[in-house]
Structures are given as C-alpha cells and as structure tokens.
C-alpha cells in the first residue's frame, strides 16, 4: 500500500557477508521514513519554511520510539547541502546523498557530535562542549550537539550547559533526547523546542511490518505480525528486532502465529478464552489445570494475566457496543464464542473481573513466584464470579451486589459472595490469599539472578518480552556474577541490548549491574542449547529398538518431537518451569 521508493529508507548496498539487522536496514533516513510522528514533522516544516529554527530541541518519549534516529535526521536537515552541493539553507527533505548527509548518518561528521549523558554525566564532559561551541563549524552549516539521555547530567553539568543555552552562538544547535523529561530542569526545558515522540499505534506498526516483510520476501501470518506489534508496545525498533528473531527462529515457509507466540512466551488466545470461561464459571480446579498447562508450555504468568485483562476489556466492549473488534480475528470461531460469553456476563461482573485481574497482574509482576500469584488471583476471581457452571442462568444476585461495588475492596469479595467454586474445602483456605500476596508484593526486589536462565525468567515475569527474546537468542554468555555480566552479542542483537539489560537488571534487582560486551567466545545461546538438546533427544530416541523398527518399517517417517511426560508433570513445582 505504501510506495516503497518514497519511504525514505536508507539506500543500502547489498553486502552478503554480514547480516544487517532489520532495525538498522530500515532505519529512516529522512522525515518521510519516520512513521507516526506527523506532529513533529509539521512543526519542523513550518519552522524551516519561516527560517525560525530553535537553538535547541528536546525529544522525549519512551525507549525505542526513535529519538536518536530523529535527532540525526534533524542534524541532516540542518546541514544538508543537496545533491549538487549548492543548497544554502536547511531543508526538511535532506537529500541523503551529499557529504554532510552521508557523514552524519555514519556518525562521523566533525561538526555533529553525539554524546551519551548516561555515561558522561559530569561538568568536565560538558565543558568540552561549552568550549567547542565558541568555534565556528569546520565544514557544516551548523555545529550540532546531540545529547542522549540528557536527564542524567549532574547539576553542575546542567548549570554549565544553561549558560550556553541562554546565549547560544548562531552557528550552534542542540538536540537533546530523554526518556525522563521530568528530570530535566525547567530552566533547560524552557529554552528548548519540545517534541513528544509518540508510540506507534499497533495497526500502524502492523502495516509497517507487513510492508517490510514484503520487501524482504518473508511470508508471515497476519496474526503473527499483530502479536509482534503488540509485544513491541509502539516501538518500531523493537518490532523490527522481533521480526528479525521470528525470521531466524522459523524454519518453515511461512512464519506462523504459533511460532511467534512461542518465541514471545505468549498464549494461544482461544486457550485464554477457555481459561477465562472456567474462572468466571467458578470451575477453579479446571482453571488451575489450564493455567498449569499453559505455564508448562512456556507461557509467562504475566502474559496470561495480560491476556485475561484484554479479554475482559474486549468482552465488556462487545457488551456495550456489539461488533467491537480487536482481540480475536473477526469471523473466527473465538470471536463468536466471545460474543456468546459476553451475552452471558453482566457489566458489573465484568468490571469486577477487570479490577481483580488488574490487582492480580501487579501481584504477579512483583511476586517472587509469579505462577503462584497468578493462581491466587484466579482463585479469588473464581470465588467472586457470577457465571453459573451450567451457563444460561445469569443470576441477578451479582447485579444487585453490583449496585454498591465500590463500597468494598475487590479482594474482600470472596468472603461476601457465595462460594460456588468447585474446589475441595481444603483449598478454600486459600481464600485468605490477599494477605499472603501482600507479603509477596513487598518483596519488590528478588534475589540476584545467578544464571542466564534466571534473568530470562525474571524478564518473563516482569513482562519484558522483547528483552526476553533477545536474552534467549542473542546472548553468548561469557561470564555471569552478581552485578556483572559479560557476553558476546549475536549478529541479530540490537545495539541497545547491553544498555537495556543493565537498566532492567537495575530496576529488577535494585543493584547496579555492569554489562560488558565481548568480541569473541561465549557459550551457545539458550535457544541454540535448547535446539541441541532437542536434537540429541530425538537422536537418542531414534536409537531405541522400537522406534528404529517403526522408522525402518515406514520409510520417510521422522521424529518431529519428543515429549517427556514425567518432566511435564514436575515442571509446575519448579520455579522457572523447565521446558518440556
Ligand atoms: Zn544532503
């Protein structure tokens, strides 16, 4: 649907020897390639047209929305001299081929300096800039200073910078980028033109991904693209990175939704619908069985909770505005089932389910054993649910209750509603769950991870599904000690992996982590180890006499997988659920 020549992607020479990650290959080179940032483009266009260009820009937004990329495009726009080298004013359409454009894209223009304030926070680091500002640019129209994560600067550094920002020489432009705008002093902010880079809507992201998959001649199911787009949470970079991984993971002709879900630790949505129906029907034992099974198959408890919340939201919307779409593919069997289910549930009970699930989500996220917290949340919800097991008969009881739902906390519900749930009285003791989960919640920072698998589990539990995929597929571990991790990044690893990992580990463990990159060595990635293990098991099974006999008898038969029933049954008892 898009015109590929006009998308403004970098024209890249084909280099077969080195794999070029999609995020880099399709990094936008001018404003036309920058999807979803129309407001910024409009404002800048006006400023350029009237010649009123700010001295300093502040780009804010969550990680992965393209702040650094945008900063470089602005630097190009300021300094482009056109293909014939004759343009004398900044242009909103940098040509991409003149010397300044090329040099800036490769981060090697002497007059365009990039600095990461996360690693250089002090006044001395800034002094270099302050002094350089006095001299005219060597060759460009403007000297451009790009300072990433500017909120990390120390107070003296900000003060030093402020003097320059108050009276900037006409040949200097600053472009700041930050994920935490509130940590930037107002005195600095007030001297910048601010742009809030927004997350890209899922639909928009899906279109973008589809276009790239098409260009790359990769076949991928639409549902798989949607799963990637949702997991990327509005970040084009993350989305491309995940698409990259999906391409590497998948050996078949078409990348399927199933393989993408497995990669992301997501759950088949029809399974979640089953689970939802059982929970709200008060069939606790069955529901817990489903949950365990999903977990054994590698689903993250947090992802399950998120899906349950999404289903609740979807059903509520279907209820108030029939024909609402989104969660399930239109026309699918699930969509029909969902509509059916929505008809049976009352709005008050759906709202209550939403509140309880939301509370459960936070508990799962913060618990040391997320699966346990998820079970507790489902049990609580089942006890408060109003869908009779035999369906059909929706009791007005809950609607009557619903008249004063805000009067009591959702967690108090089990005690006051009729326990219709079909569990043995032994487990009803768990109805006291709220207190226990409160305790679990207080353990915000868990023990330090000791293995890469621990970190993967942690990432899954905290809902960092993108990082989790990279941890499994792109990390050749060299060394891991508390507070220190060294690894060799795989060819598809995003450049931001080390930084992202350091930040997340700090958030999750409360301690500072030093993440070092190695050039060589390192163990096979977890994904590789898993594949090797599976191959070895298949090989071992193939050697068994009975299997050999079958293989001999049926030429062309092959072993596609080995299931270990015993291992699957003990898995739930383990914290990190070994794969089965
Ligand atoms: Zn140019």
Image (cartoon, helix red, strand yellow):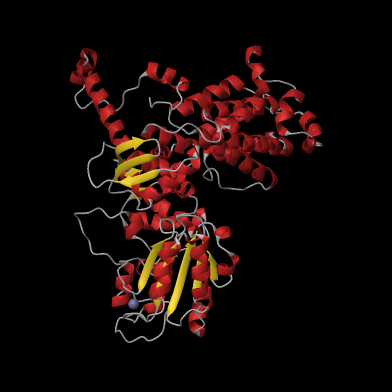
| Residue 253 in view (yes/no) | no
Residue at (77% x, 33% y) in the render: 408
Q: Position of residue 211 (x, y in %)?
A: 39, 58
Q: Please name whichever residue, 131 or 448, is drawn nearer the observer in this view of the structure.
A: 131
Residue at (67% x, 38% y) in the render: 355
Residue 386, by quadrant, is: top right
Q: Position of residue 137 (x, y in %)?
A: 35, 80
Q: Position of residue 295 (x, y in %)?
A: 47, 28
Q: Please name whichever residue, 221 or 13, is drawn nearer the observer in this view of the structure.
A: 13
Q: Please name whichever residue, 34 or 120, is drawn nearer the observer in this view of the structure.
A: 120
Q: Position of residue 471 (x, y in %)?
A: 37, 40
Q: Quadrant of ligand 1?
A: bottom left
Residue 255, by quadrant, is: top left
Q: Please name whichever residue, 457 or 35, is drawn nearer the observer in this view of the structure.
A: 457
Residue at (46% x, 83% y) in the render: 170
Q: Decide: is 87 above or below 19.
A: below
Q: Decide: is 138 above or below 498.
A: below
| Residue 469 in view (yes/no) | yes
Q: Decide: is 136 above or below 482.
A: below
Number of disc labels: 0
Q: Is residue 127 left or right of residue 338?
A: left
**Quadrant, the N terminus:** bottom left
């Amino acid at each position: 649907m898009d015109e590929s020549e006009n998308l403004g992607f970098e024209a890249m020479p084909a280099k077969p020897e080195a794999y070029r990650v999609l995020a880099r290959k399709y990094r936008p080179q001018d404003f036309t390639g920058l999807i979803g940032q129309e407001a910024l483009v409009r404002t800048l266009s006006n400023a350029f047209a009237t010649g009123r260009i700010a001295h300093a820009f502040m780009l804010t937004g969550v990680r992965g929305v393209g702040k650094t990329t945008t900063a470089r495009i602005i630097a190009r726009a300021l300094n482009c001299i056109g293909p014939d080298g004759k343009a004398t004013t900044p242009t909103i359409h940098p040509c991409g081929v003149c010397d300044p454009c090329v040099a800036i894209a490769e981060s090697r223009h002497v007059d365009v300096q990039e600095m990461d304030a996360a690693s250089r926070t002090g006044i001395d680091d800034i002094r270099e800039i302050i002094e350089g500002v006095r001299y005219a640019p060597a060759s460009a129209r403007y000297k451009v200073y790009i300072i990433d994560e500017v909120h990390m600067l120390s107070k003296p550094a900000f003060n030093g910078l402020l003097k320059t920002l108050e009276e900037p020489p006409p040949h200097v432009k600053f472009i700041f980028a930050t994920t935490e705008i509130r940590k930037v002093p107002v005195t600095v902010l007030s001297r910048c033109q601010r742009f809030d880079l927004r997350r890209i809507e899922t639909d928009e992201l899906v279109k973008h991904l589809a276009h790239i998959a098409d260009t790359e001649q990769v076949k991928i199911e639409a549902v798989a693209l949607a799963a990637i787009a949702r997991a990327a949470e509005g970040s084009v970079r993350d989305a491309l990175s995940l698409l990259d991984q999906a391409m590497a993971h998948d050996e078949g002709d078409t990348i399927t939704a199933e393989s993408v879900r497995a990669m992301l630790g997501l759950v088949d949505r029809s399974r979640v619908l089953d689970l939802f129906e059982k929970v709200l029907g008060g069939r606790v034992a069955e529901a817990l069985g489903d949950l365990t099974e999903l977990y054994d198959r590698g689903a993250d408890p947090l992802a399950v909770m998120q899906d349950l919340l999404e289903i609740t939201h979807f059903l509520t919307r279907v209820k108030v505005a029939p024909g609402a779409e989104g969660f399930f593919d239109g026309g699918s069997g699930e969509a029909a089932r969902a509509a059916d289910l929505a008809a049976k549930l009352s709005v008050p009970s759906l709202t209550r389910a939403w509140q309880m699930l939301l509370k459960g989500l936070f508990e799962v996220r913060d618990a040391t054993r997320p699966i346990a917290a998820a079970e507790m949340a489902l049990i609580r919800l089942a006890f408060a649910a109003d869908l009779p097991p035999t369906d059909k008969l929706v009791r007005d009881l809950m609607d009557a209750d619903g008249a004063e739902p805000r009067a009591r906390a959702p967690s108090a519900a089990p005690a006051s509603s009729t326990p219709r749930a079909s569990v043995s009285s032994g487990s009803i003791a768990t109805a006291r769950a709220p207190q226990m989960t409160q305790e679990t919640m207080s353990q915000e920072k868990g023990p330090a991870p000791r293995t890469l698998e621990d970190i993967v589990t942690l990432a899954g539990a905290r809902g960092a599904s993108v990082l989790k995929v990279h941890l499994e597929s792109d990390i050749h571990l060299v060394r891991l000690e508390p507070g220190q991790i060294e690894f060799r990044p795989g060819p598809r690893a995003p450049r931001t992996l080390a930084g992202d990992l350091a930040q997340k580990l700090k958030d999750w463990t409360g301690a500072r982590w030093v993440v070092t990159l190695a050039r060589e060595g390192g163990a096979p990635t977890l994904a590789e180890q898993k594949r090797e293990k599976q191959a070895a098991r298949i090989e071992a099974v193939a050697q068994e006499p009975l299997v050999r006999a079958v293989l001999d008898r049926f030429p062309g038969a092959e072993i596609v997988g080995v299931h270990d029933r015993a291992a699957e049954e003990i898995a739930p008892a383990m914290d990190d659920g070994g794969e089965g």
